[in-house]
Amino acid sequence: MPHSFYELYNLMPKLDCGLCGNPSCQTMTRKIAVRDSEPEECLPLYANSELKKNTQKIKALVREGTEIRATGTIVNEETGFAYIHPCTTEADKVTAETKLMSSLETAANLKYGFFDPLQICVILNTTDVFQNAKCSPSLGIGRAHVNSKTVLISKNGKINVRQAKDKEDAQYTIRQVARALWSATICTCGNASVDCASGGCEQCQTQVCPVMKGGPPDPVVERQHLTQATTVPAIFDRVKTLKTRGYFEEGMMQLDEAFRLFNQTNFRSSMEHSANDSLLKLAEDKIAQANKLAIQFTVETSNVHDAYIGLILSGLAMDSTRIVNGLKRLTSISSEISALMLAHLLPEAMAVATDAYYNIRTADSKKAKQVRARYEEFKERWMEAFRSTPQENLLIAIEKIAVNGFYISRLLTRPLPM
Ligand code: SF4
């Protein structure tokens, strides 16, 4: 029996530190599963004596075979349904099933799968679009209510709707679900599109992201592609003209608060542990709220040319989540932080992260380039420390803070669909 994404992922460090060149361990897991990368490229896995034994286990699973690629379903191309028929329990209602298509829908491009199983569960548990959600990241399936209908979601892009009033109601529900799950769609680069939107994707630095320009996944293949490129400052202007701008603006304000809380953390004394814990818990709540508003924006913005702006807000929330996780890790081990790290590396990582965010708020591309250069300098000093200090856990947490600032700064200079 082929091994699943989740079996491999469970053997990974789950640090999302970016040291392998990918913004998440999920992306790296997919690449290892299809032999595009090797476990040795994950420094925390390879450098940690405890985790190192997982390298061989991962290799053994890959040798035995993995099941990552999304599989298809026969769909009626006009309606987008695989089937539609009366519900067995309520004959005046219908049950319908579809296999969503993405703009990347060719056999070669689905080699990493359709939806990121972990991201499906994050979304189901974040947004009010779904009620009574239950989700299994290990199986890659979710179940929830959407406006009194029951919806089943699979990582392969299969959506089943029960108790819909009629065909139109089923189609509308499926499209709402697809919009909400857009940020979980896996791109050709192996990232969930939330990571393409976070600035974490290398390929997106030089090309308009295919999963963003193709629009949300849909039951029918035909769609309008966005082909021209724009930038973050331009989309921030565009958002001001939209009816749904309130979600976006409130979401950004929640992130402002989170960054204000980050700046209040203090690692100079272990006395500050519980104060840091409270600050970071508050920051997490703000970030979760920002992501919820981002999904709401994506679902409710009528024009698909504008809806993807919600993905950018989700991407920023993802960067912020990883910064919070880095800070939480530091809080849990802060008694070990050396004077050198306190004096140099940590303040520098915090400066990269917070300056990057403030540059996004002021849409200052020139300053974003300076932050990128500052991150490169930070990284050189970080590498020296990594070679000479036995505090790898601390160093990886500090790097995680800085690299997410670096991703945010890249958002300002990359091309976006117009
Ligand atoms: S290097 Fe970091 S992000 Fe990459 S797989 Fe390893 S722990 Fe995950």
Image: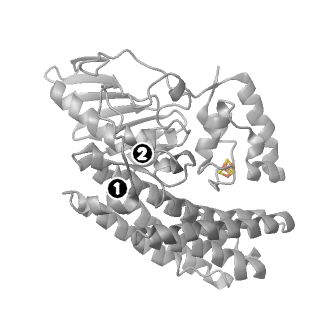
Would residue 154 appear left or right of 350 to someone viewing this image? left
Front one among 277 and 112: 112
Would the CB of label 2 be found within 8 Å of ligand 1?
A: no
* Most distant residue in the right direction: 388
Disc 1 to disc 2, C-alpha distance? 10 Å
Instruction: Pick whichever of labels 1 and 2 is earlier in the sequence.
Output: 2
Image quarter of residue 4: top right
Query: What's the residue type where badge 2 is placed?
Result: Ser
Residue 124 appearing in the image: yes
Q: Where is residue 205 in the image (x, y as percent from the top left)?
A: 53, 51
Q: What residue is drawn where x is 29% and y is 34%?
A: 224
Q: How crowded is mark 2: few (under 14 residues within 10 Å), some or many (20 or more)?
A: many
Would residue 406 appear left or right of 397 to someone viewing this image? left
Query: What's the residue type where badge 1 is placed?
Result: Ala
Q: Disc 1, disc 2: CB below 8 Å?
A: yes
For the image, the number of numbered tags is: 2
Q: Position of residue 313 (x, y in %)?
A: 39, 58
Image quarter of residue 34: top right
Front one among 1 and 202: 202
Would residue 52 appear left or right of 173 to someone viewing this image? right
Q: Residue 183 carries which label?
A: 2
